[in-house]
Amino acid sequence: MAEPAKLTCQELVELVTEYLEGTLPPAERVRFEAHLLDCDDCPVYLDQMRLTIRVAGALSEDRLPRRARDEMLRLFRDWNRC
């Protein structure tokens, strides 16, 4: 049986939401976590995502201006770390 292809940084970025929500299929989760062990940048990206989610979750909608919210969402969509 062939070993599954290694996950790229771009693929990790695309799968990070499913990983954090616990909905990533087991085989993909193994590839995701293997990539984290081999990459210097992606664990930092994952930590930043966790922190951002925690901080954003603590803000009420009236404390986060719509323009700032839209810009933050745009930056996450455009993130291309690796």
Image: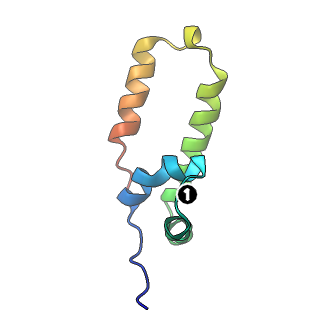
Q: Is residue 15 above or below residue 7?
A: above
| Above or below, comparing residue 81 to residue 64 in the picture | below
Name the foreground residue: 3 vs 77.
3
What amino acid type is highlighted by mark number 1? Pro
Q: In this view, does 33 lie to the left or right of 72?
A: right
Q: Which residue is nearer to you in this view: 35 or 26?
A: 26
**Residue 42 in the image: x percent, y percent?**
49, 58
Residue 79: quarter of image:
top left
* x and y percentages locating residue 60 in the rendered image: 62, 14
Percent position (x, y) of residue 8?
38, 65
Q: Name the residue under label 1.
A: 43
Q: In this view, does 56 lie to the left or right of 74?
A: right
Judged from this view, the residue extending furthest toward the top is: 62
Instruction: Report the front residue among 53 and 81.
Output: 53
- Where residue 74 sits, quadrant-wise, is top left
- Picture coordinates of residue 65, whole percent (x, y): 48, 11
Q: Name the residue located 58 percent from the left edge and 11 percent from the top edge.
A: 63
Q: Residue at x 56, y 67 (%)?
A: 26
Question: Of all residues shown, which one is farthest toward the bottom?
Answer: 1
Q: Which residue is drawn at 38% across and 34% down?
A: 75
Q: In this view, does 60 lie to the left or right of 6?
A: right
